[in-house]
Image: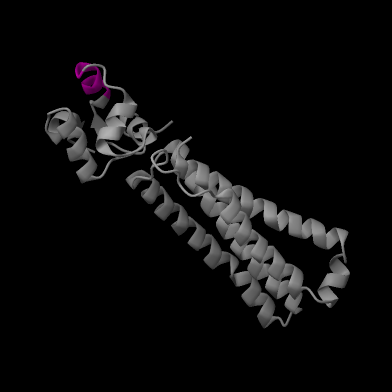
């Protein structure tokens, strides 16, 4: 299945690095649904800037640490 | 299944079920020929009303503390409604054309009803595709 967004992320890796945080725990902390976290992790949804900042804050990281965008088309 | 997706499924079922029951009732009751010539307004209004009531019954309000709607639900809703609006705009050409051709009121009214049904069904289906395949 094609990925609808070019934004990539390290959320899964960061969850495991932060005490094996579950998707549900992250969803609760960011106040979104678990399905939204799953969709973001799988590249099926690009979160809003606000949610991106909230996710980064949960991991004590910057948005750039969590999300990336390809340099060239 | 998250609340937003569950709600969309309920809308889709209602959008398809109520008009199907209405058509079945018309065909089993007075029949098409008699409906075209006779009083069709009351059954059609009942069908429209039944659709509204069915939406209230099937589409449950969010449960406190359990159901959450977030920005992704809102974005899917917005995009799905836009698809539905395009379908409605295109489908409304049919009742307009029928009116210009001075067709029976029955056909004009039902073409308009069909346009709304199509819009609701396609909009819900589009939202479900967005839920599954992503935005």
| Residue A29 versus residue B71 in the image, above or below | above
x, y percent for residue A38: 36, 30
x, y percent for residue A51: 23, 41
| Residue B17 versus residue B103 in the image, above or below | above
| Residue B39 versus residue B31 in the image, above or below | below
What's the residue at 45%, 46% (across, down)?
Answer: B62
Q: Can you name the residue that lies furthest to the front here? A: B64
Q: Quadrant of residue A66?
A: top left
Q: How many marks?
A: 0
Q: Which residues are magenta?
A: A12-18
B102 within the magenta span: no
What's the residue at 62%, 59% (across, down)?
Answer: B53
Coloring scheme of the render? one colour
Q: Quadrant of the C terminus of chain B?
A: top left
* Position of residue B82 in the picture relative to residue B124 (left or right): left
Residue B48 shows in this picture: yes
Q: Quadrant of residue A1?
A: top left
């Amino acid at each position: 299945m094609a990925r609808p967004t070019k934004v990539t992320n390290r959320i899964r890796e960061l969850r495991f690095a932060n005490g094996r945080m579950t998707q549900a725990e992250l969803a609760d902390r960011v106040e979104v649904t678990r399905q939204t976290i799953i969709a973001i992790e799988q590249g099926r949804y690009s979160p809003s800037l606000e949610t991106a900042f909230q996710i980064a804050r949960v991991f004590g990281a910057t948005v750039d640490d969590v999300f990336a965008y390809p340099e060239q088309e | 299944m998250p609340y937003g997706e569950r709600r969309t499924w309920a809308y889709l079922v209602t959008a398809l079920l109520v008009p199907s029951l209405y058509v079945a009732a018309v065909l089993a009751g007075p029949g098409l020929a008699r409906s075209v010539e006779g009083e069709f307004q009351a059954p059609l209004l009942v069908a429209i009303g039944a659709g509204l009531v069915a939406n209230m019954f099937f589409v449950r309000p969010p449960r406190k503390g359990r159901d959450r709607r977030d920005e992704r639900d809102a974005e899917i809703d917005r995009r799905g409604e836009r698809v539905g609006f395009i379908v409605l705009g295109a489908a409304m050409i049919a009742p307009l054309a029928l009116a210009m051709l001075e067709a029976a009121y029955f056909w004009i009214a039902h073409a308009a009803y069909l346009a709304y049904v199509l819009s609701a069904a396609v909009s819900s289906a589009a939202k479900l595709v967005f839920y599954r395949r992503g935005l």
